[in-house]
Image: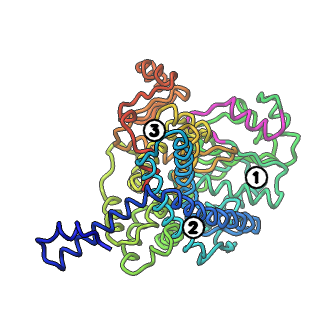
């Protein structure tokens, strides 16, 4: 029933229109009044619904683990649903904390209308979200059994055995079976899949027990010989890692394969590292590099190029990563052009497909195609040039400021560094990247953001537990993004800003020139004024 005073106020308006206006405002008034009057009931209804959702989520995760044990790949639909539930769980925990605080405070104080209103409103909104997730809990496809002719064992789900990669793999395997070949080079553009190919070859030879020992080591642009030796020694169960001791132990193995990833310049494998691949015929080495010149200076016996994907293979990979939306009417023609703009590079195809999979409107795809066709910075090499726009597009499609800042923060770690998730959280809190959150909330939210970045393929899982990694090409491209973001990371001696990423002595010099900023960081204070003004952490937790 509408109060008489409302009708009187609208007396001068046409009776029909006036009544409609009165009903509209009365309905709004009742809705907002109910937020603080019935806040307890609204929270209890949310909790009841969320407990049901959480139980279904736990059951779903158990099914995921069972499917993975059966060598099945979980569908993106399931992963996205679980990710949304995880996001809602964080928001529910925030509402529950506010509710408990409100109940506790009202025991000794007068009722507080504003906190009641906020709890009631957020509980109502999140209950709608919980209902939507409950309605979509029945998945069209839960998991997929991998076709061995197309995809590899799920232990290396990034590998896709298309024409170019299949040909390269066969050449490397033939070389491994050749007694006259001991040093094999795999080369190709950054982002073409060299590391993934080598990992798949390592998995295959382990499975076939072709070698007694298979060791994989990351070399990087600035190789640390002592670290390379330690990695090999650890794989062999040795405490001593001198070149002489390593050579002695490797000679004792009948057949050993050492895989060196990301080699940029000549390494003295025998004299400096202690890998006796020339004198011990049972010792074989595979290395990856972006340039064939590196294979030449390393004097490889066989050099195998990993070519870019064909147009059709590019489309198949893009379709797998972008989902069914890429094949829908009105979008597929544009989606095919987007896939072509990725230049046959799997890394670009994957990150762009992931970035666009949630867009149902063809205009959004047209905008993405336009962005991909724009020019790139003039100072970039050919490798980064072909990847710049796809990776920039993926970065720009990150939904929140916190996601973008945390990604850029990860880019400050040195190349091929195993980034501890706990370490990222501590830095994020100390740098005030996650403002207006308690330490506990920030720890959860940081973990959630890292999972989102991994889903977008901008971050990779590390082989080291509790760590993530950056593809070196992603890191190189991030250094050339024109962004108002400027940070220093004294512990790693690197910088990202207008001048890009610098390692080693250059990074140390930058730190000396900015010692005040370094001291501020050691004291846990933000050094970037933009970060001090950032208040998007709270906004990201609300609708």
The image shows residue 358 at horizontal and vertical percentages of: 45, 66
Kindly identify the residue that appears in the image at 67 percent across and 67 percent down: 60
Using the rendered image of the protein, determine whether residue 293 is visible from the camera's viewpoint.
no
Kindly identify the residue that appears in the image at 67 percent across and 33 percent down: 268
The image shows residue 149 at horizontal and vertical percentages of: 67, 73
**N-term-proximal mark, 2 vs 1:** 2
Q: Quadrant for the C terminus, please.
A: bottom left
Badge count:
3
Say which residue label 2 marks: 76
Say which residue label 1 marks: 180
Task: Please say if 470 is above or below 316.
Answer: above
Left or right: 496 as drawn, with respect to 98: left
Using the rendered image of the protein, determine whether residue 78 is visible from the camera's viewpoint.
yes
**Residue 457 — which label?**
none
Q: Nearer the viewer, mark 2 or mark 3?
A: 3
For the residues bearing labels 2 and 1, Cβ distance under 8 angstroms: no
For the residues bearing labels 2 and 3, Cβ distance under 8 angstroms: no
Dot 3: few (<14), some (14–19), or many (≥20) neighbours within 10 Å?
many
Does 234 appear in magenta? yes
Task: Please say if 207 is above or below 488.
Answer: below
Residue located farthest toward the left when viewing the structure as drawn: 12
Mark 3 → mark 1, Cα distance in angstroms: 60 Å
**N-term-proximal mark, 3 vs 1:** 1
The image shows residue 422 at horizontal and vertical percentages of: 62, 39
Does 351 appear in magenta? no
Q: Secondary structure at mark 1?
A: loop
Say which residue label 3 marks: 435
- Which region shows up in magenta? 218-238
Nearest to the observer: residue 437 or residue 28 = 28
Left or right: 7 as drawn, with respect to 258: left
């Amino acid at each position: 029933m509408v109060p008489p005073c409302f009708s009187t106020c609208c007396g001068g308006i046409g009776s029909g229109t006036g009544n409609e206006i009165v009903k509209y405002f009365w309905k709004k008034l009742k809705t907002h009044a109910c937020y603080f009057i019935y806040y307890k009931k609204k929270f209890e209804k949310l909790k009841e619904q969320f407990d049901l959702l959480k139980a279904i989520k736990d059951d779903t995760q158990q099914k995921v683990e069972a499917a993975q044990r059966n060598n099945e790949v979980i569908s993106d639909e399931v992963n996205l649903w679980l990710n949304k539930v995880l996001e809602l769980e964080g928001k529910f925990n925030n509402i529950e904390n506010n509710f408990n605080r409100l109940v506790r405070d009202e025991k000794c104080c007068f009722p507080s209308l504003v906190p009641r209103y906020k709890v009631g409103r957020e509980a109502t909104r999140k209950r709608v979200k919980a209902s939507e997730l409950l309605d979509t809990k029945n998945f069209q496809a839960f998991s997929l059994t991998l076709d061995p002719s197309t995809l590899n064992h799920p232990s290396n789900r990034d590998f896709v055995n298309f024409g170019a990669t299949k040909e390269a793999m066969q050449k490397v395997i033939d070389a491994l079976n050749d007694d006259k070949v001991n040093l094999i080079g795999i080369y190709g553009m950054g982002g073409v899949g060299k590391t993934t190919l080598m990992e798949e070859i390592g998995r295959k030879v382990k499975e076939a027990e072709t070698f007694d020992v298979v060791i994989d080591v990351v070399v990087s642009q600035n190789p640390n010989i002592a670290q390379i030796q330690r990695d090999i020694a650890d794989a062999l169960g040795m405490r001593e890692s001198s070149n002489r001791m390593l050579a002695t132990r490797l000679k004792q193995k009948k057949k050993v394969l050492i895989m060196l990833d990301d080699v940029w310049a000549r390494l003295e494998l025998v004299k400096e590292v202690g890998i006796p691949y020339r004198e011990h015929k049972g010792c074989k080495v595979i290395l990856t590099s972006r340039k064939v010149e590196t294979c030449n200076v390393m004097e490889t016996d066989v050099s195998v190029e990993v070519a870019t994907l064909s147009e059709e293979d590019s489309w198949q990979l893009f379709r797998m990563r972008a989902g069914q939306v890429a094949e829908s009417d009105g979008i597929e023609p544009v989606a095919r052009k987007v896939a072509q703009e990725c230049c046959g590079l799997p890394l670009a195809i994957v990150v762009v497909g992931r970035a666009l999979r949630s867009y149902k409107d063809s205009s959004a795809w047209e905008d993405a195609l336009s962005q991909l066709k724009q020019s790139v910075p003039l100072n970039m090499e050919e490798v980064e040039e072909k990847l710049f726009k796809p990776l920039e597009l993926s970065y720009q499609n990150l939904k929140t400021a916190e996601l973008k800042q945390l990604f850029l923060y990860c880019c400050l770690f040195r190349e091929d560094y195993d980034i501890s998730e706990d370490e990222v959280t501590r830095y994020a809190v100390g740098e005030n990247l996650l403002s207006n959150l308690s330490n506990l909330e920030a720890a959860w939210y940081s973990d959630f953001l890292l999972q989102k970045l991994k889903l977008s393929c901008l971050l990779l899982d590390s082989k080291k537990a509790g760590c993530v990694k950056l593809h070196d090409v992603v890191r190189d491209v991030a250094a050339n993004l024109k962004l108002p973001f400027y940070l220093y990371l004294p512990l790693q001696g690197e910088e990202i800003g207008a001048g890009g990423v610098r390692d080693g002595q250059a990074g140390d010099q930058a730190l000396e020139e900015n010692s005040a900023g370094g001291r501020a960081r050691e004291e846990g204070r933000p050094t970037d004024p933009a970060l001090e003004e950032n208040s998007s952490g709270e906004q990201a937790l609300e609708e």
